[in-house]
Amino acid sequence: MAQPTGYLRIKNIMTTVLVTGGAGYIGSHACVELLNANFDVLVLDNFCNSKATSIKRVEKITGKSITLIEGDVRDKATLTMLFSDHQIDAVMHFAGLKAVSDSVNNPLAYYDNNVMGSITLLEVMSEFSVNNIVFSSSATVYGFSDDKPIPETAPLSPFNPYGHNKRMVEQVLADISIAEPSWNIASLRYFNPVGAHPSGEIGEDPNGVPNNLMPYVSQVAVGKRERLSVFGNDYPTIDGTGVRDYIHVVDLALGHVAALNKLMQGCGLLTLNLGAGRGYSVLELVQAFEASTEQKIPYEIVNRRAGDIAIYFADASLAKQVLGWKTTKTLEDICRDAWRWQTKNPNGY
Ligand code: NAD
Ligand code: UDP
C-alpha cells in the first residue's frame, strides 16, 4: 500500500513489505500475519498457481486491505514500476513453482521461474537499495540426509531440479551478503507445510490430484477420492510408513514475521530450518485426522514412491534460539484446520 503524502518514514523501521507469490498457499497465510503485525502489504502474483480470491479472503480475515499487482517476478519492467511507485522496505519472496516431479520433467521452466525470477527480483531490489529479503527455501536442499533430526549444518545434496533451484538461490543470497554486508537475508528451509487458517477462509488449493499427503487425506475425507494409497510400510520407522515434520502453515507464517523482525534489527545472513522438530508417520497422521475430524480415511498399502526418504525432520533449535520462534500448533490443530478449510471449500477457491 502506498504511504500517504507527508508520511514520515522513521529510519530503520520497516513498514511496507512486498510479498511475491502472496496469493499462494503459504504467501496468503504470511499476508494475514503481516497485516496482523501491522505491516503494509503489497502482493505481486502472476496467478499461475493461485487465484485473486485468496487475497480477498485475507482482507476479510484481517479487515485490512492489500495492494495487489498482477505480474511476473521475471518481468523487470513490472518490478521497476512497482519499486518506483511504492516505498518498499522488505520483500518476502514466495513466488515460484513447487512440484518436484514437474521440475524433473520441465527443468528449464523451473530454472527460469525459480532461479531467474529470484535473480531479476534481487537485481531490482539492489537498484532501489531495498536490502531486506526473506526467501522461501526448502528442506529439499538436504537431499538424502542421514541426520535425524537435520540441522542447518547438514551437507546439502539436492537430487532434483527443484531442490537445485532452492540451493542455487540460497547460494546467490549468501554471495550477496558477502559482497554487500548491508543486506539482511533470511533463507528459511521449510519442512512440510500443512493445515489451513483456523477461519477456514484460506488454505491449500492444489490443482488436480494432490501429490502431498495432507491434501490427499482431506480429499478422501470429503469424498473426492476413494482411498489413500500409503506409499510403503517397510521403512525403518515406528509403523513402517514414512516420517515427516509437519508444520502448521500459520506457525510457518509467524516464523516469517519473526524473521522479518530480525531483519529489521540488521542480522546479515540467516539460514534457518522452519519445522516442528518432530516427525509423524503417515499412519499417525491418518489416525490423528480420523480422531480430530471423526471422518474415516480408507487406505491401502502400496509400493514405496520412488525417491522417498524414510525419516525427515528438522532440528528446529536454531530458529528458536535466533528468532525466539517455535511452533505451537499440534497435529490435531493441523488436521482440524485442514478439514475446516476442505469442508468450507470442497472445490477450492
Ligand atoms: P503456491 O504455488 O501456492 O504459491 C506460489 C505463488 O507464486 C502462487 O500464487 C503462484 O501463482 C505465484 N508465482 C509462481 N511463479 C510466479 C512468477 N514467476 N511471478 C509471480 N508469481 C508467481 O506455493 P506455496 O506452497 O505457497 O509455496 C510458496 C513458496 O514456498 C515456493 O517458493 C515454494 O517453493 C516454497 N516451499 C513450499 C513448500 C510446500 O510444501 N508448500 C515447501 C518448501 C518450500
Ligand atoms: N504419502 C503417501 N501417500 C500419498 C502422499 C504421500 O503415503 O498419497 C507419504 C509419502 O510417502 C511420505 C509422506 O506421505 O512418506 C509425506 O509425503 P508428501 O508428498 O506430503 O511430502 P514429502 O515426501 O515431499 O516430504
Image (spheres, helix red, strand yellow):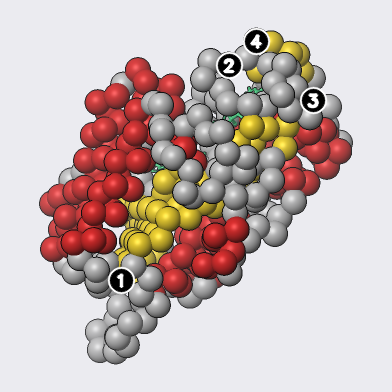
Query: Along the horizontal axis of the image, is 310 left or right of 285?
Result: left
> Which of pointers 2 and 3 indicates the residue nearer the eye?
3
- Percent across and percent down for residue 242 are 67, 27
Q: Is residue 45 above or below residue 290?
A: below
Q: Which mark is residue 303?
A: 4
Find out whether the residues at labels 2 and 1 contact each other: C-beta distance under 8 Å: no
Does any portion of residue 35 appear in the rendered image? Answer: yes
Q: Is residue 194 above or below residue 126?
A: above
Which residue is at 69% across, 40% downward?
279
> Which of pointers 4 and 3 indicates the residue nearer the eye?
3
Which residue is at 49% across, 60% downward?
256
Q: Earlier in the sequence, mark 4 or mark 3?
A: 3
Amino acid type shown at disc 4: Asn
Amino acid type shown at disc 2: Arg
At label 4, counting other C-alpha atoms closer than 10 Å, the crowd grade (few under 14, some 14-19, many 20 or more) is few
Q: Is residue 113 above or below residue 127?
A: above
Q: Which residue is mark 2?
A: 305
Amino acid type shown at disc 3: Asp
The image quadrant where one finds ligand 1 is top left
Q: Which mark is residue 239?
A: 3
In-front residue for pair 234/109: 234
In-front residue for pair 230/35: 230
Q: How far is the residue under mark 2 from the one under mark 1?
A: 43 Å
At label 1, counting other C-alpha atoms closer than 10 Å, the crowd grade (few under 14, some 14-19, many 20 or more) is many
Q: Which residue is mark 1?
A: 89
Q: Secondary structure at mark 1?
A: loop
Which residue is at 78% across, 46% downward?
332
Find out whether the residues at labels 1 and 4 contact each other: C-beta distance under 8 Å: no
Residue 179 figure quarter: bottom left
